[in-house]
């Protein structure tokens, strides 16, 4: 949850990929987003899929945001959403899904402590999941392996572990996750950099090796693709949305 607590200063925030989709409820003023080089006003209740590159958000007034971060496959399993359609996109929740999620919206917009909101959301999801159909366990197993290995696993190794062809795994990932397994490995390997810097005292010379990059130049190129900045210029200690979501 992010709350400006009366500060309505307009700020432009950079958002960078972390590998997890979200459901976002703005209980104050809405945000503007620039995802595909065009600014647009976001809906107050929306779903954000996988993003493959950095983009910008800007508040339009008072900030009040309650967000639920999901496992990469969860929106497909829970609501049968085609995650490929949500890639590089954040869309308003509408129609039947909006009606279904009315209890969650009421919780998000209610003036109750954050811990109470979390507890009530957990109860709602536990009850809702009881009647959901069985998920594709192979794609979930593959995604878990990518996360466990911090992106340091090959496509062939994944296929051998879950027992499917590369073509099938590609198809499953695009539907359940929104990107290919190879690209998802890249996102998770990139996001592991923030965990390393947050949890351990490591030298910059060791970061690329510990994060599984071939060499320093490969590490810098990958980092710049996802953030638009070189790692030595990136403000890891700054209090912004990007660091808030990536420093788990």
Image: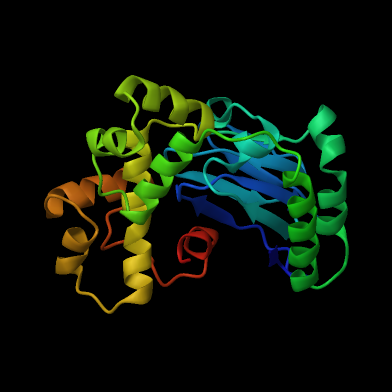
In the image, residue 164 sits, relative to residue 100, either above or below, namely above
Q: Which residue is drawn at 38% across and 73% down?
A: 198
Quarter-of-image position of residue 160: top left
Does any portion of residue 227 appear in the rendered image? no
Left-right relation of 94 to 37: right
Query: Can you name the residue that lies furthest to the bottom here?
Result: 201
Q: Which residue is drawn at 59% across and 42% down?
A: 74
Query: Can you name the residue that lies furthest to the left here?
Result: 215
On the image, the x and y values in percent for residue 10 come to 66, 57
In the image, residue 160 sits, relative to residue 234, either above or below, namely above
Give the colour scheme shown. Answer: rainbow
What is the total number of numbered labels drawn onto the structure image? 0
Left-right relation of 164 to 216: right
Instruction: Give the position of the N terminus as an image quadrant.
Output: bottom right
On the image, the x and y values in percent for residue 246 come to 46, 60
Does any portion of residue 76 appear in the rendered image? yes
Closer to the camera, 161 or 139?
161
Quarter-of-image position of residue 42: top right
Quarter-of-image position of residue 167: top left
Q: Which residue is drawn at 59% across and 49% down?
A: 70
On the image, the x and y values in percent for residue 181 come to 36, 34
Left-right relation of 218 to 146: left
Closer to the camera, 206 or 127?
127
In the image, residue 152 sits, relative to residue 193, either above or below, namely above
Q: Which residue is drawn at 64% across and 29% down?
A: 81
Closer to the camera, 211 or 38?
211
Left-right relation of 133 to 136: right
On the image, the x and y values in percent for residue 146 come to 35, 47
């Amino acid at each position: 949850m992010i709350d400006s607590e009366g500060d309505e200063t307009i700020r432009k925030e950079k958002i960078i990929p972390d590998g997890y989709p979200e459901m976002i409820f703005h209980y104050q003023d809405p945000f503007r987003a620039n995802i595909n080089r065009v600014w647009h006003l976001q809906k107050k209740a929306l779903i954000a899929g996988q993003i493959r590159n950095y983009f910008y958000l800007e508040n339009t007034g008072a900030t009040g945001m309650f967000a639920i971060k999901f496992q990469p496959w969860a929106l497909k399993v829970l609501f049968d959403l085609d995650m490929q359609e949500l890639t590089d996109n954040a869309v308003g929740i509408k129609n039947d899904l909006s009606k279904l999620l009315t209890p969650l919206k009421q919780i998000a917009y209610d003036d109750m402590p954050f811990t109470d909101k979390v507890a009530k959301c957990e109860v709602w999801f536990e009850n809702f999941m009881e009647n959901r159909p069985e998920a594709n366990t192979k794609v979930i197993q593959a995604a878990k392996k990518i996360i466990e290995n911090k992106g340091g696993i090959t496509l062939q190794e994944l296929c051998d572990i879950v027992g499917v062809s590369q073509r099938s795994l590609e198809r499953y990932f695009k539907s359940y996750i929104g990107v290919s397994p190879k690209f998802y490995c890249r996102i998770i390997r990139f996001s592991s950099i923030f965990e390393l810097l947050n949890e351990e005292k490591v030298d910059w010379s060791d970061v690329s090796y510990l994060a599984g990059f071939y060499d320093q130049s490969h590490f810098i190129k990958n980092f710049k693709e996802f953030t638009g900045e070189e790692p030595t210029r990136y403000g890891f200690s700054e209090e912004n949305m990007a660091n808030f979501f990536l420093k788990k």
